[in-house]
Image (cartoon, helix red, strand yellow):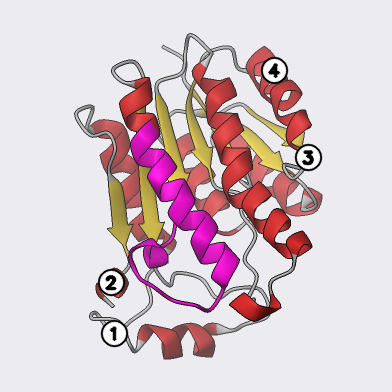
Amino acid sequence: MKKAAFITGGGERLGKAMALALAGMGYDIALHYNSSEKPAKKTAEEIKATGRKCEIFKADLSITRGIKPLTARVFRAFPYCSLLINNASIFEDTDFMKVTEESFDREFTLNFKAPFFLSQEFSRRKSAEIIINMLDARVSTIEPGHFVYNLSKKALRDFTLMAARALGPKIRVNGICPGPMLPPPGKDSKYLKRISGHIPLGKPGHPDYVITALKYILENSYVTGECLFVDGGQHLG
C-alpha cells in the first residue's frame, strides 16, 4: 500500500533528516520549501535515489490564503498522503519590549497560524491519518528571550492537544519537542556545546534522536495528544 508524507520546511536541517528517514521507511515525500530552493532540490534528489517518489512545492506560508491551493497541489500529486509534519518555522531573538506588531505577526503566522490551517486542510482529506507538529523543548519553561517565538510554540503545543481531541479517532495529532540539536543560523558548534552544558544530560543532541521519536509516534497507533520531549532534559529547567 502506497503512503506519502507532506513536510513543510523539508529541504534543510531537521526537516531534511525527517524526509530522508521517512523515505527509508517507504514514504513518498511532498517536500515544501519557500526560499531554500537549492537545498530542497538537493534533498529531493537524495530521496529519489532511495527509490521513493518526491516532489517539491514552493509556497510562502506567511500568506495563509495560499495554504488551501498548496494542499490541493500536494494531494493531486499524492492522493494517498496520510502524514503531515508541520516543521517550517521562524526563530527570532526578540525581547518583549522590542517586539513590534510586524515581528509578532511574522512569527505567529508562520509558527502557529500556518500549521493550524494546514492541519485543517489536511484533515479534510480521506487519506489523512497523522499530524505531527514540531515544537520546542522550551514550551514547558518560562523564558522571556525569543519572546514571540516561545509564545507561538506554546500556542502550537496547546493546539496539538486540542486537535487530538477534535480529530480523533480518525486522525492522531502529536508533537515533538527537540532540544539543542543543530546550531541556529549564524551560530556554530561551540555555541551549541555551550548551551547544552546547562541541561541535565550536558550535551547536544543529534537529528537521529528526533527520527527515533518520529518512528515511535508513527508505529504506536495508540498515541495521540502527546508532546514528546527529545531534549536531554532541557524542559526540566
Q: Tell me, yes or no, whether the two marked residues, 2 and 4, touch with CB atoms within 8 Å.
A: no
Q: Which amino acid does the dot numbered 4 rest on?
A: Ala
- N-terminal of the two: label 3 or label 4? 3
For marks 3 and 1, give the one nearer the viewer: 3
| Residue to which mark 2 is pinned | 232
- N-terminal of the two: label 2 or label 4? 4
Q: Which amino acid does the dot numbered 1 rest on?
A: Gly
For marks 3 and 2, give the one nearer the viewer: 3
Residue nearest the observer in this picture, 33 or 21: 33
Q: Secondary structure at mark 3?
A: loop
Q: Tell me, yes or no, whether the two marked residues, 3 and 4, touch with CB atoms within 8 Å.
A: no
Residue at the spot 36% in from the left edge and 24% down from the top edge: 166
* Left or right of 112, for residue 205: left
Disc on res. 61: none
Disc on res. 72: 4
Is residue 71 covered in magenta? no
Q: CA distance from mark 3 to mark 4?
A: 16 Å
Q: Tell me, yes or no, whether the two marked residues, 2 and 1, touch with CB atoms within 8 Å.
A: yes
| Residue to which mark 3 is pinned | 63
Residue at the spot 28% in from the left edge and 78% down from the top edge: 237
Residue 126 in view of the camera: yes
* Left or right of 227, for residue 163: right
Please provide percent x and percent y for residue 15: 55, 50
Q: Which amino acid does the dot numbered 3 rest on?
A: Ile
